[in-house]
Every structure is written in structure tokens, then in C-alpha cells.
Amino acid sequence: MTLLRHLAVAAVAGVALFFATYQLDPFRNYQLATAAAYLCAVAGLTVLVGQSGQLSLGHGALMAVGAYTVALLQNAYGTTGPWMLAVSLAAGALATTLVGAVIGLAAARLRGPYLAGVTLAVAVTVPAIATTFDEVFNGDQGLPVYVDPPPAALGRFFPNERWQAWLALAAALVTMVLLANLVRSRFGRTLRAVRDDEVAASLAGISVARVQVLAFVVSAACAGLGGGLLAVLAFSVSPSAFSLTLSLFLILAIVVGGLGSLAGAVWGSLLLVLLPQVTESVTDQLTLSPAVAQRLQGNLPLAIFGLTLIVVMIATPGGLQGLIRRGARALARAARGLATSLNRRKVGT
Amino acid sequence: MERFVFLTFDGLSKGAVYAAFALALVLIWRGTRIVNFAQGAMAVVTAYAAYSVTAASGSYWAGFAAALLGGLLLGALIERGVMRFVEQAPHLNAVTVGLGLVLLLQGVLGMIYGNEYRPFAAPVGQEALTVGGMPLVSPFDLFVFGTVLAVMVLLALLFTRTATGLRMRAAAFAPEVSRLLGVDVNATLTLGWALAAAVGALAGMLVIPTGLGLHPTAMDLVFVTAFTAAVVGGLDSPAGAVVGGLAVGLVLSYVSGYIGSDVTPLAVLALLLVVLLVRPGGLFAGVRARRV
């Protein structure tokens, strides 16, 4: 039943987004595609942090694994056929799954700040790996990514950005359906049991370490897919695109959206894409010298993101989705109150 | 052999800085059970303050004093303004707020100073002195040893010989009882954060001249390394932090000297993982039942 409902929601969302891509201009379509790529990773991370209670600051590095795998495969075999892109993305997710399993095995034995510290160390190793294995990853420069143009069947003037949006949205929808089912399944319940009380969970026969490793593996696969999509969208990969800041942005997205909430992951991903653009248009309004404008461009969003993270964590740890849920509940209560008072009046007359 | 001796001194000098930075992490961990993930970013802020003061006054030492004072202020400010709200909350909240501070501070620094590397002066020469034809230590290394040693002695005196230090230890050990006995626990927490941030600022002043220069992200790797050092020594032990810092400094110096400087982040990660998986309480931890 749940599966059917999730599929129905995904189908409706898919159709709506399909028509939306025809309404949006290329730039907006590209933003939509980027948000969808982020969503894959953010949704996986929110399940890991919110549902299983393990914090990972290294998901930016996991996205890099997916991105570099896609880049290497596409550059080697990208011209063999239109299906190759799907194969590359799947391989990117698979490679990240393996790396995630290794990190997850270590993570399952760590708690609290220790886990955060180790995954932070993972996040800062990306440039080191790229420069150490220079001949494969081409150091700080990174690699270009070969991607086929949109299929000829769509017409000669089909905008590339719309095609990219379709690709990323399809991947994001599949990820969301799979994760939504996972969260509602028996596995999802064991995840929450482990998060809330490890001792009680293991007394109930749950293998705590196994569940935690599995959760890490699942979210790593999602991060790999998201990273691969980012590589495809940008036609390039480089260590600077997968810095510590990206990992922190992912944390911001899940916290602002609401930890553990897949709907919140959507809000978080949209925020990651839209806020830098909003700040840019605001700074464009002000008349600033080019040097000052350039400094503000990359850094103002960073500062705003940081401030948002602090304020949300202190003021509303449930995030946006928590606020929405609370608002909906208050509305429902008000409606119920109104209905009973109306009924009472009716009875009275 | 010559190279080994040189690398050893270099490692000890780097290790002394990691020890100071790890000590700052341990100070906060003992008082509040928080790992301050913003420690690196806070140290960079004070280093930029030093940079500006030095540029304006022309004196390195004015900048040095500004960094330490700025550290005290910034630590107190962040404890009072932000961290106080998450001290009782789950670990995740404190870590997240720390990360938010990292983004905020790095963003603000980038807005003011831009994202290019700036040369950061050292007070004395960084060329190694040769003893009997063998390059040994640079004057800057000696400066590092001296400063770190002085700070450690001062902190040890503060904690073991003064009433304030006793109050701080009591507040960290048993907050409720200390409060009943008239210790202003909140004030000691703020003082602890201020001291830790000042020690972190000092470590920043000592480590940034040896790297690429001043940059909003200059301390990211140093933070991870110092965290490793603190974990090696056990997060609860100040003496462990010092030993851990020196050990990590030596290991990294040998790795970067014999294998290549590019792989040092990987070595940090490997070291951290090995220590956490083999001796999660740190190398000096006694046998202790795991709290669940």
C-alpha cells in the first residue's frame, strides 16, 4: 500500500516537473537539475543522520567518489552508446557504495564527536587523493567529463539544460521513492530503534552494528549518484568542487529541511541552489566596486548559510518540515475546534 | 641520518603546535563535553586580526598580543552568545552549531579580506641553523618550543596552584555540587572557552607562517590533525594532548619527508582511524566500562 502511494506521489511529481521543464528557461532548468542532483545526496544523508543517528561530515568526499568514477568511465567509454551514461552513473553509485561500506564499518564503532571527527578527516582528504594519484585524477585541475548531447529523437534544437533536468530529476525521483519505502519498511523501524536506544534495540534482537553499516552504505550510494550527476551537469570534476564546504552544505540542507525528513530534504536542496543566486541578485542591486562585489559573491552565501545553520539548530531543531508539521497540526486543531463549536451551536438551536 | 635528525626536529616543532591546539580542544571538552569544531576557524579569525594590527602598527608583537586578546574575547563571546544554548543538547546539535560557525566565520573573513593567500610573517628566521654541517632547527622552531612550553607551564600553574583553576576543575568535574558550594559555574565555563580560544589563537600564530599563508580555510587541516592528536592522547587528558600532539607531529613529519607532503592528510586519517578502532579512549586510557 505504502509502495503504491509513494509511486503515485512520484508519478504526479514527475508529470508536473516534466511540464515545468517546458515552462522554465534554460538557466532555471539547470538550477532544477542541480537541485535534483543535490537532492539525491541530501536525501540519503538525512536518512543516515535523522533516522539512524550517525553524523557524517564526509558526504562531500563520497560525492567526489561518484563524480570521479563517472568522469573516468565516461571519458573511456562515453561514446559507445546512449545507455553508457546510465551505466556510468550506476557504477559511480556502486563504487561509492564500496567506499561507504569501508567507512561505515569504522563508523559503526564510533559515537558522537569521534564519528564527526573521522568523517571530517575523510572530507579534507579529497584534494590530497587527487594530487597523490595525479596521473589518474589530474591533481587540482580535475578532469573534463564527456557527455553525449541530448538524443536526436528529441529534435535538433532541444535545449541541453532540459535534457539535464530530465536526467537529474529522474534519478532524484527514483532515489526518493526507494528511500521513502526504506524508511517505512521493517529496516526503517530498526534504524529508528537503534537511534533511540542501542541497548534496547540489541536486546530486541537487532544487530546494531549491521544496521548502522547498512544505513551508511545506503546513504553512500545516494551520495555517489548525486556526485555523478553533478559531474555530468558541470561536464567536469575537480577537488575544489567537492571541498569540505560541500559536506557542510549538505549538513545545512538536512538541518534546515528537518533531520530525517525526506520532504525536508527537498526544501534543503532547493535552498542550496537558490540562496547563492538570491544573494547575488541582491548584491547586483547595490552599486559596489568590482573587487568588493567579487569578494561578496562567494562569501556572502557562505556566511548566510552558517548563520542559518546556527539559528535553526538553536531555535527550531526540527527544521522547516518540523515547522510545517507543527503549523498543519495547529491548523487542524483550530479547524476541529471550529467544527465542534459549530456543531454545539446546531445542537443548541 | 642527517635527514632523520632534521625531520625529527621539524616534527617536534610542528607537534608542539598541534599539542597546543589539541590542548585547547581538551580544555573545552573537559568543561562542556563539546568538541569545538569551530576552533580552527576561530584561530584564523584571530590570525587575521594579528595580520591587520601588524600591518597598521608595523610591529609583529602588537599583532601577536592582538591575536591572544582577540582569542580571549572571541572565545567568551561564542560561549555566551551561541554555545550556551546547546551545551545541554545532544552531541549532534553542538557539532552542527560548530560547523555553522565555521561557515559563518570563513564567509565573513572572505568578505573582508578576500580568498587569496596572504603572506604571514614570522618574528624570527625560518632557515634551519646548521650545527657541524647538519641543518638542525630554525630560530622559529625554537620560538615555537619556547612559547608552547611557556603556555603549558602557565596553564598547569593556573589549574593546580590557583583558586580559579581549582574552581574550573571542580565545575568541570561536578557542576551541580560546585554550584551548591558557591562556584559560578557559568562564569568558569566562559573563562574556559576564552582560555581555550586564546591557546588556539596562539597555535594559529605559530602554525600559519609554516604553511601556504593566511587564508580563511588555513586551519582546516590543522584542526583535523589536532583533533587526531587529542584523540591519540584521550580527549580527557591535557598531558595526553601534549604527548599526542608531539607524536602526531613526528609521524606526519616522517611521512611527508620520506613519502611526500601530499599524503599527510591521508596519514592523519589513517592514524585517527587506527587509534579510534584499537584504543578508542586514547593511548593513555585506563580500563573503563563503556557507557551506553
Image: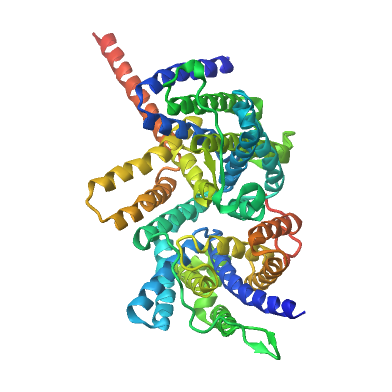
Residue B220 seen in the figure:
yes
Rendered view: A126 above or below A41: below
Image coordinates for residue A217, horizontal then vertical, percent: 66, 37
Q: Nearer the viewer, residue A7 or B108?
A: B108
Residue B56 lies left or right of residue A265; in this view the side is left
Q: Nearer the viewer, residue A85 or B102?
A: A85
Image coordinates for residue A209, horizontal then vertical, percent: 72, 41
Q: Split into 4 quadrants, where in the image is the N terminus of chain B?
A: bottom right
* Image quadrant where residue B277 sits: bottom right
Image coordinates for residue A33, horizontal then vertical, percent: 46, 31
Q: Residue at x 52, y 58 (%)?
A: B37
Residue A60 lies left or right of residue A156; in this view the side is right
Residue A325 lies left or right of residue A96; in this view the side is left
* Image quadrant where residue A89 sits: top right
Residue A293 lies left or right of residue A77; in this view the side is left
Q: Nearer the viewer, residue A303 or B56?
A: B56
Rendered view: B285 above or below A20: below
Image coordinates for residue B55, horizontal then vertical, percent: 36, 76
